[in-house]
Image (spheres, rainbow, N blue to C red):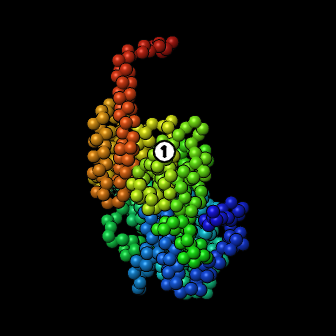
Amino acid sequence: MEKLLFKDIDEPGLNTIDVYRRRGGYERLRKALAMPREAVLNELLASGLRGRGGAGFAMGKKVSFLPKGAMDVYLCCNADESEPGTFKDREIMQKNPHLLIEGIIIAAYAAGANKAFIYIRGEYVLQADILDAAIAEAYAAGFLGENILGSDHSLSLVVHRGAGAYICGEETALLDSLEGKRGNPRLKPPFPANQGLYQGPTLINNVETLSTVPFIIEMGGEEYAKLGVENSTGTKLVSISGHVKRPGNYEIELGMRSRDIIYGLAGGPPDGRKVKLWFPGGSSSPVLTGSDEDLDLPYDFDTMAKAGTMLGSGAIIVVDDSTSVVEVAYKTAYFYRHESCGKCTPCREGTNWTLKMLDRIRKGEATPMDLDIIASVCENIMGHCLCVLGDAMAMPVSSMVKKFRAEFEEEIERRRQEADLASAMPEPELPLIQGAVA
Ligand SMILES: Cc1cc2nc3c(=O)[nH]c(=O)nc-3n(C[C@H](O)[C@H](O)[C@H](O)COP(=O)(O)O)c2cc1C
Ligand code: SF4
């Protein structure tokens, strides 16, 4: 398959403007600026590009929702990348920062935005420094600032570092954080396209989404749409982690068979092990199993949705049969309980209670009835929260309980017996420590 985003990714020095330009960098910007704004937007619409950050919303449509008028329009690039299992944006920013910058300038042109921000997670210190250096080079070369390449398009671009909260990847919490407030999700509507940063119209897109824009301008939207499958066009970066021989980032054409990604690209689980389950789109996606039926599914937005899960951020986490499903559910719930901002009750209380019940199983204190309670708590979280962080815990945990009920029941019984045995054991006598008595 011909690669786009990762075409030159291992080229030494690609993070510098000289090497990037030698590889054709910023020529797509030149081409875009010679086109009317509407024509650039039409290419984005024709490409069918869906957001790569998690929700999969059509990018061109989002740009077209921005009101036209006298107000300042903002562009925010979501580089928070906090969803467990996801590390693709990091590789783009670290190795090819100018691709992202070029994509931002073109997207800002289509959106009529003159001020842009990259909101990057605080832990990405190296990547933020690389971006800062690349932005300084782009300003010096006249690709950022006033009247870019002699056009009427001007753009300022600033990197803003977050402070380590997963919730700040949620687009409205990101905006609050960028404004200097505590990062809490806002009630929607109004959506950021109408009322976003500083109450102004705002386009928010993921790093990978924006980095794809130069290729759409280069190839033309229609040509780009020929890649992938219907309704899931183009290529996608997948981050594969967990029990596979070759974890890492891979660029695939959407619609590739999941088995070919997990076994073909990532080498499958260690020898002698089988895939027990896999998260297809980050830790918030309902899990699929190692069955042939699931592994043979084409990896695209619609197929994943039809299978009751989602493509999400494109992070595939593989768990083999050496791992207890109870531990996977516990770790998942632990993360979301910790990251809940606490603003709404079903998420704040529901994530906490789910974690406590999973811990009861681990400690040998649960009965199979607890599984029904976990399922019911998850049911009451889903769709009842201000943002989808609550669902992000409820969906994978309830899918594990549903698909691996027999294993949960076995573990409940085994751990109860172990706990009973431990409590029946006599207290061990403590050895005397010589000279410890005064
Ligand atoms: C709790 C939560 C965390 C999120 N974290 C991220 C993130 O780290 N990066 C990201 O691009 N999108 C994240 N999103 C999705 C964003 O809200 C938003 O949909 C996305 O930035 C839009 O960009 P896209 O259309 O290009 O995907 C998160 C959503 C939620 C609910
Ligand atoms: S769902 Fe959770 S993280 Fe989202 S606003 Fe409510 S409490 Fe906060």
Left or right of 225 on screen, residue 367: left
> Where does the N terminus fall, quadrant-wise?
bottom right
Please say if 97 is above or below 287: below
Report the residue at 61% width, 69% height from top.
99
Q: Position of residue 324 (x, y in %)?
A: 45, 36
Depth order, front residue of 157/389:
389
Q: Is residue 12 above or below residue 43?
A: above
Q: Is residue 17 positioned above or below 85 on the image?
A: below
User: Residue 71: x and y, percent?
Assistant: 41, 82
* Side (left or right) of 347 relative to 109: left
The residue lying at 31 percent from left, 48 percent from top is: 378
Looking at the picture, does residue 109 appear above or below residue 19? below
* Mark 1 CB near ligand 1 (8 Å cut): no
Res 80 seen here: no
Picture quarter with ligand 2 = bottom left
Q: Residue at x 61, y 47 (%)?
A: 267
Q: Position of residue 355 (x, y in %)?
A: 35, 42
- Location of residue 326 by image quarter: top left
Residue drawn at (39%, 81%), measured in percent from left and top? 67
Task: Kindly indicate the quadrant of the structure image that contains residue 198.
Answer: bottom left
* Left or right: 30 as drawn, with respect to 393: right
Classify mark 1: residues with Cα within 10 Å, few (<14), some (14-19) or many (20+). Answer: some
The reply to whether residue 414 is visible in this rendering is yes
**Residue 425 x/y as whole percent:** 38, 16
Which residue occupies the foreground of this view, 56 or 430?
56
Give the secondary structure at mark 1. loop
Q: Amino acid at mark 1?
A: Gly
Q: Quadrant of the C terminus?
A: top left
Please name the residue that numbered disc 1 is placed on: 290
